[in-house]
Image: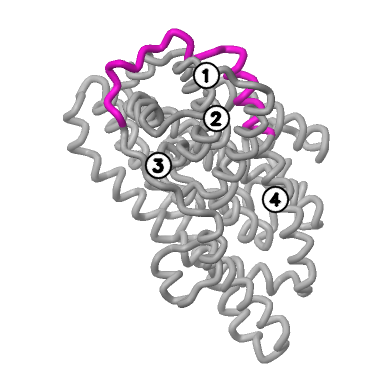
Amino acid sequence: MLGRWFEIALWKRILGAMLLGIVVGMVWGPGAENIAWVGTLFIRLIRMVVVPLVFVTLISGVVSMGDPSKLGSLGVKTLAIYMATTLAAITIGLVLAAFMQPGVGVDLSNAIPGQIQEAIPLSERLMNIVPSNPIAALAEGNILAIIFFALLVGVSLLTIGEKGKPVADLMDSSSDMMLRITHWVMEAAPFGVFALIARMAGTQGVAALLDVVTLAFAVLLACLAHMILVHGLLIMKLTLKLSPVMFFRGARDAMLVAFSTSSSSATLPVSMSVAEENLGISPVVASTVLPLGATINMDGTALYVGIVSVFAAQVFGIELSFADYVLIAGTTTLVSIGTAAVPGASLFLMAAVMETIGITPEQIALVIGFIFAFDRPLDMLRTAVNIGGDLSVSTAVANWEGEFDKEIFDRPLKY
């Protein structure tokens, strides 16, 4: 029986666990909190491997490049395409929100004002990239600071030549070790996903979305449109001449884990694993582009913040001009960079966008209080979009840098 369990493809086990979790949660209700510890344990397991995995794989990848100058080309292309896809996401969100008008006729009189947390200034986030203490950055899980320090270590190993070979070999072996541990942790994914989904369905209820069905449908439609049109058609099909079906098939494990955990950073080990093993992305690109994406690339968050901003304007009768939509798009693109890769973080970063179109702090608090009750299901959806976008960009950058194995990408996977 145990053998049969492992013969089933992991994505099928995860998907089955999600569906079963919804049923159990709806039947059990608040009692589903009793198994929440299983989900918490799973998240702790995958968070456990994030920092060492990013650190050793990035150093190993830089050393394997053999030429530090390639990092500059890789970095410029990565940042450019991340910003472009984020702008595309917010544009899709704004167009759908303007067309579907989810805020028209919505009454917020019964909403309990939510607490608005001030977003971390972009300048401060940029300053934190350089760690004052690398060991502290590793302990705190500061991904951008870890990337910066790991790049320095990798480049230094290249420049000292043979003297650095023992450390380089150690990093290479450590990279294989951490990927093996990630595979073991992923075998616990169905159980963790089951507990997380059951708790969500039992405590919040999927029916909560019925209160804001138009807004929820607008977000769902925007997420699907962005993944299919931008990442599937524009990037995979037209730009890279690759099969969108093969891409989504290769990325599905990571997107399912992202959906259940609502955390881009918690999904990072899974993303790196599927990038190398399913999508044919070399370790140097996967270990550089994906951690950066988990920190700054928030396509799902960007389109969600844009839709909710237009929703708020419609609720309070604020007429938006074309210039206002451009302002929302620009502000949201920048705000999404400062979004923490943890569940629900975007709720507290909407204030910066809404204030640009004249919505008062009191009105913002009402909107946040109104959507807070049903935010988690939508958070799960947009996190899956974030991860799908990270993997799509990684595939593109790997292609352009000659770090892509098409045979692995096209290889039949276990169904």
Q: What residue lies at 47% left-to-right and 63% top-to-bottom?
A: 142
Mark positioned earlier in the residue sequence (2 or 3):
3
Could you give the CA–CA distance between mark 4 and mark 3, rounded to whole angstroms?
29 Å
Please state which of the two labelled residues, at mark 2 or mark 4, is closer to the viewer.
Answer: 2
Which structural element holds mark 2?
Answer: loop
What amino acid does circle 2 point to? Ile
Could you give the CA–CA distance between mark 2 and mark 1, rounded to whole angstroms?
8 Å
Magenta stretch: includes residue 409: no
Mark positioned earlier in the residue sequence (3 or 1):
1
Could you give the CA–CA distance between mark 4 and mark 1, rounded to whole angstroms?
48 Å
Comparing 111 with 274, the one in front is: 111
Could you give the CA–CA distance between mark 3 and mark 1, rounded to whole angstroms?
30 Å
* Whether residue 379 is situated above or below residue 38 in the rendered picture: above
Could you give the CA–CA distance between mark 2 and mark 4, rounded to whole angstroms?
44 Å
Residue 271 visible (yes or no): yes
* Label at residue 146: none
Comparing 315 with 407, the one in front is: 315
Cβ–Cβ under 8 Å for marks 2 and 4:
no
Residue 176 visible (yes or no): no
- Which quadrant holds the N terminus? top left
The residue under label 1 is 318
Cβ–Cβ under 8 Å for marks 3 and 1:
no
**Disc 3 packing (10 Å; few <14; some 14–19; many ≥20):** some
Q: Position of residue 168 (x, y in %)?
A: 62, 79
Q: What residue lies at 43% left-to-right and 55% top-to-bottom?
A: 184
Mark positioned earlier in the residue sequence (4 or 3):
4
Cβ–Cβ under 8 Å for marks 2 and 1:
yes
* Label at residue 343: 3
Cβ–Cβ under 8 Å for marks 4 and 1:
no
Could you give the CA–CA distance between mark 2 and mark 3, rounded to whole angstroms?
26 Å
* Label at residue 280: 4
Mark positioned earlier in the residue sequence (4 or 1):
4
